[in-house]
Image: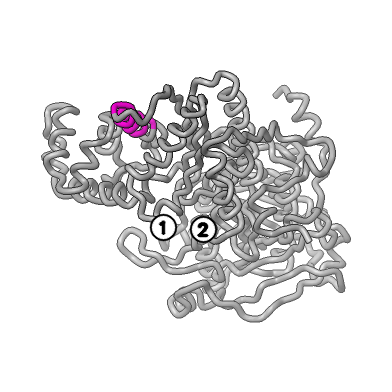
Amino acid sequence: MEFSPLQEARYSYVPKLPLVLRDGIDHIAVEAGGATESIADHDALRALFPSCYGKPVLKFATGKGSTSRKALRLGVILSGGQAPGGHNVIAGIFDGLKAGNPDSVLFGFKGGPGGLVDDKAVELDAAAIAEYRNTGGFDIIGSGRTKIETPEQFAKSAAVARARTLDAIVVIGGDDSNTNAALLAEYFLGEGVPCSVIGVPKTIDGDLKNDYIEASFGFDTATKTYAELIGNIERDAASARKYWHFIKLMGRSASHIALECALQCRPNVALVSEEVEAKGQTLAQVTETVASSIVARAAKGMNFGVVLIPEGLIEFIPDFKALISELNDMMAARGDEFKAQKDDDARVAFVEKALAGASAALYASLPVDIRRQLIMDRDPHGNVQVSRIDTEKLLIAMVEKRLSTLKAEGKFAGAFSALAHFFGYEGRCAFPSNFDADYCYALGYSAFVLAANGRSGYLSSIRNLSAPASEWIAGGVPLTMMMNMERRHGSEKPVIKKALVELEGAPFKAFAAARADWAVETRYRFPGAIQYYGPAAVCDRPTETLLLERPRK
């Protein structure tokens, strides 16, 4: 493989570590707090996790070390969607292992959790790790979305751990993946399998966080990547002065990405799904929010602008949510009749007649392409695949329709020409920012320390992230501490609760205080490309979200 100049240069970057992890493992003491509780459903979770529930929060401190120096055998799994920095987590684990004992071995299970079940392991040596340090992607071993949930899968995982005499398995993943890690940890403890299970918090969506997990890795790099693109489009919009750009951003369950990009770039409109739901806004009201900005700017001679849209917006709009629910129910009950229609037009007409009331009216008001998407693109269970709906194009069509009405009423005299974009995969495998390169390496090293101390059922934790890396606080938080019970596929399941945008939180309040001005004026901010070399104030700066949530002292 031929390497780019930047890739060559990044190989020589040495990630920064918290001081407690830089002094050698003989000087790492593990301090334990008191017993913990889950965020809800205490009795149910205590019953499901009798061995893991209630464990203390752990903090690493400089002192008399308890970390084992014996040769260890660890396995690592990349689970779920990619996020920048995953390779550095593995590098941190590897370097910690070798610092503890050069005879330690690291195995990578290929293709995600299914690689553990099927024992698709490869030994990761120094040469393999060297090729991936400080680079994006998950291609060192690949990822997968298999869930270890059946008795057979758990039994196979235990057999692999025993056959390979693993001391620990590190699962690098998001909320669902780490819920799976907690279940695996509990199973191993219950079955007497001498193998710890440790999690690492990954997701560009930013929805895996709490007081002890201040950020999931990859969020920093992904939002900076998107913000560069948005800033470029803003500059183009202000130059051409004739287009409105509607930009959908990845993040189905939470709007953290859209909010962070808004704070970085200051677009004219940024929609936040959690606010839309909290206010019970209809699709018509969301449309009006955008149209109002277009009308106000047109009155000032500015027929251009930028709108940011969270990927999962329509699932948070109450009337659209009701429509999707009715469509799913109708398809379940009358699927054969639907399939028997002679063509797509007949199927659309069939659905229009099958729906009733507000849902029928909403469906009929949608652009024909969206009406087709809602009924043609179904998942294996027959449900609408919401993530595949072109929300940005839906909003353009709805806004266009609204502006036509306003023009007929003499309330809009401007021009409207719109372009649609979706920024998603562009950010998942970018070269990690210095922040993510450092953070991920520290998370990996911390995961090794947890494993070397025989801890299981923990998520690697690095805190105080708005401070310089030397001041970061390393440790571990019990996975059960972040859980509640939710109804999934007809039954109650333990899950790590997703962290949605808090409307009373500092990031949203900062955005809300400025957006009325942004809607009318041109206040664009241009973050530019991620910088890897130069002043720390530029190269190591964390996200606006983190700086607002945890101001530097």
State the residue at coordinates (46%, 69%): 484
Could you tell me what secondary structure mostly forms the magenta stretch? helix
Magenta stretch: give its range: 396-408
Please report the residue visible at 32 percent of the width from the left and 42 percent of the height from the top. Answer: 284
Residues at marks 2 and 1, CA–CA distance in whole angstroms: 9 Å
Of residue 466 and residue 213, the one placed in the foreground of this image is 466
Residue 458 % position (x, y): 62, 66
- Residue matched to label 2: 503
Q: Residue at x 57, y 51 (%)?
A: 513
Q: Which residue is mark 1?
A: 278
Q: Quadrant of the C terminus?
A: bottom right
- Residue 194 lies left or right of residue 363; in this view the side is right
| Residue in front for this viewpoint, 263 or 7 | 263
Outermost residue, front side: 410
Q: Who comes first in sequence, dot 2 or dot 1?
A: 1
Inspect this view and state whether residue 495 appears. Answer: yes
Q: Residue at x 36, y 50 (%)?
A: 281
Say whether residue 238 is left or right of residue 535: left
Circle 1: element type? helix
The spot of residue 466 in percent (x, y) is 74, 55
Q: Is residue 120 visible?
A: no
Coloring applied to the structure: one colour
Q: Does the magenta segment cover residue 399?
A: yes
Q: Position of residue 288 (x, y in %)?
A: 38, 40
- What amino acid is at disc 1? Ala
